[in-house]
Amino acid sequence: MPQPFRLAGREEYPADLVVEVSGLRFGGSDLIVIAGPCSVEGEETYLRSAKMIKAGGANMLRGGAFKPRTSPYSFQGLGREGLRILAAARKETGLPVVTEVLDVRDLDAVAEVADLLQVGARSMQNFPLLKELGRMRKPVLLKRGLCATVEEWLLAAEYILLAGNPRVVLCERGQRQDRASQRCALDLAALPLVRRLSRLPLIVDPSHAAGDRSQVGPLAQAAVEAGAHGLLIEVHENPEAALSDSAQSLHLDEFRALIGRLSTQAAGLGRKLARPVS
Ligand code: PEP
Ligand code: MN
């Protein structure tokens, strides 16, 4: 049976697709590390963290301005003010930024600032959003839904590709499961499967999969072993005080130590960490 995802698949286009994001190449041999707090919480703290995260070896910054929260009473992000802060951090550090677009009505504003437009797990099947992203000139980071099959995920990517945007990067971020000790379960087995089925670059978010910082490093390393092209890691200058995802955010020294381990690991695999842009 032919693959239902013609553009995302390998049947017609067998070679790996390399997606360029402001000088970084996703899908090649370099391992790309994106890091930053879950949410942009304020200018001073974000800029300070961004500089330390860059010094720690990250290639790209993350931070949510529009947050998809389970409870409507939780911090929802700073919205447009958060975008302004991300733009300032980008300018100050020279690092590209990724941030989530939750609502199609914010797409132009987010695209003005973001180098990579993130579709969150909860939006993976927001088809109007996927179609609009297909009309954009900016690359898209497509997270896998909390309970989505690999086929559903690749078909979501297909929506963006079919609408005309050839630059899609996939991100596995853990699947819903019922063990109380973990927030989600990182689907490591999906990594070689997706690499075989799809030509798109694939990164892993061990933070949302773990829900607990002690698991983030081991999962990040396992993901690299299983074929991830990059990692998306939550790091906070004071995780205990973070306004979202406090328990899974790494301290800066933990992040620096992990970068050291990843660098040794990458060398063993004949790969290397991408050099920070600027
Ligand atoms: C995030 O990366 O900030 C996020 C909300 O992740 P997910 O959509 O994977 O839950
Ligand atoms: Mn988060």
Image (spheres, rainbow, N blue to C red):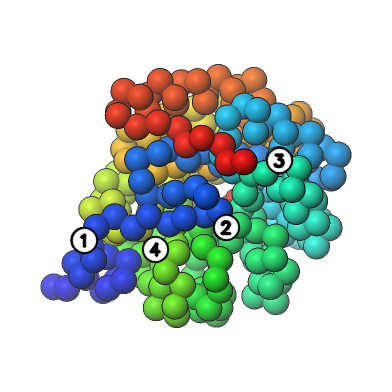
Given this view, does label 4 or label 2 mark the residue nearer the observer?
Answer: 2
Residue identified by numbered label 4: 153
Report crowding for label 2: few under 14, some 14 to 19, many 20 or more residues within 10 A (C-alpha). Answer: many
Picture layout, residue 131 above or below residue 56: below
Q: Earlier in the sequence, mark 2 or mark 1?
A: 1
Q: How many marks?
A: 4
Alpha carbon separation for disc pair 2 and 1: 24 Å
Pinpoint residue 190: horizontal percent, then vertical percent.
Answer: 31, 49
Side (left or right) of 255 relative to 175: right
Side (left or right) of 75 relative to 126: right
Q: Decide which of 275, 5 is in the foreground and name it.
A: 275
The image's mark for residue 116 is 2
Residue identified by numbered label 3: 93
Pinpoint residue 54: horizontal percent, then vertical percent.
Answer: 65, 33
Q: Earlier in the sequence, mark 4 or mark 2?
A: 2
Q: Is mark 4 within 8 Å of ligand 1?
A: no
Quarter of the rendering containing residue 53:
top right
Q: Amino acid at mark 3?
A: Thr
Given this view, does label 3 or label 4 mark the residue nearer the observer?
Answer: 3
Alpha carbon separation for disc pair 3 and 2: 16 Å
Element assignment for label 3: helix
Question: Which quarter of the image is occupied by the N terminus?
Answer: bottom left
